[in-house]
Amino acid sequence: MSLSIFKSEEPYNFYEESGLSIIKNAIKDKLFLKSTKNSMDLFLRGRDIISVYPQTHGTHEPHIINLISNLSAIGFSDFLIDIGANIGLTSCQSGKNFKEVHMFEPNPYCCKILEVNSKIALNKTNYKIYEFGLGDQNIKSVLTVPINNWGGAFIKDESNSYDEATLLKKDGFEVYDESNYFNVEIEVKNTVDILPQIFKNFENKNYTSGIIKLDAEGFETTILKSFSKVLPNNIKLFIIFESWDKNFDMNEILNLFHGRAKAYKIKRIVPWKNKFDKLFKIIFRLSKIKIKYELISNKSNEWNGDIVIYID
């Protein structure tokens, strides 16, 4: 583009918009406003996997949020520890039910949004943000972040119990392509160095019952093992987490708590069988039949999915 055009008296045409595009955009705006009228009052990232449902339905993982709400209502409301807080979707929905909220997030970009979202949702709650991850050692590491799923970020090292296939599958990929991710340097601190300070604070305030939400994309076993070493005897709590580790050994984890722990699974009960085709499933969903979620004792050795550990 030549600068001589600015010396001319003729108008400079730099953009055109058709009448049809104006109509299309107006329709899109109306549809978007309608579909997001119940959107969460937080900063969310468009098209990110974890942000779509909160925008269109106004909640994130409603079954987990309702479980946390129920548990806090029956006395486990002293504290919420959110390990892998991301942008705060769990803490910002549930935090108001607790006396204190502690959020751990190693992704520095997420922490900026987490700080703002916490200011919005937890303005009457005592909360603290820790801008590092938890593990079994103090190290500088690299966090691999799926571009379209910031909530699925992971550290790929020997402490992660997920194999590459599991890490890829959870983000909808079959093969690794570096263009689907970006990397960011983060800090990881040893769980046994950090949590005792928090528990000491709870002891001083006589906080003895709470909830831990753990979302560490393969670091669950590592964190649970470290956590078992420092949990005070007077603390009762529920640990809620998701695991897709095919070799997850629940008995090994429970034994670390020396008889104090019991494990449960969250079971989703649907009115159809897997062999039913999509049409029948849609009909069931449109009917008044409800999908239920129950906390059950697991009789098998299969522990994939949503898991709850109660420590008495």
Image: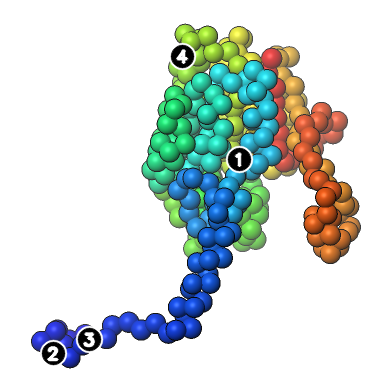
Question: Which mark lies nearer to you, 2 or 1?
Answer: 2
Instruction: Pinpoint residue 38: horizontal percent, then vertical percent.
Output: 57, 50
Q: Secondary structure at mark 1?
A: loop
Q: Amino acid at mark 1?
A: Gly
Query: How far apart are the two marked residues, 1 and 3, measured between alpha carbons?
Result: 56 Å
Q: Amino acid at mark 2?
A: Glu
Residue sitting nearer the eye, 292 or 289: 289
What residue did someone put label 2 on?
A: 9
Instruction: Pinpoint residue 114: horizontal percent, then vertical percent.
Output: 44, 40
Q: Secondary structure at mark 3?
A: loop
Question: Which mark lies nearer to you, 2 or 4?
Answer: 2
What residue did someone put label 1 on?
A: 218
Side (left or right) of 312 relative to 87: right
Question: Which mark lies nearer to you, 1 or 3?
Answer: 3
- Of mark 1 and mark 4, the one earlier in the sequence is 4
What residue did someone put label 3 on?
A: 12
Residue 221 visible here: no
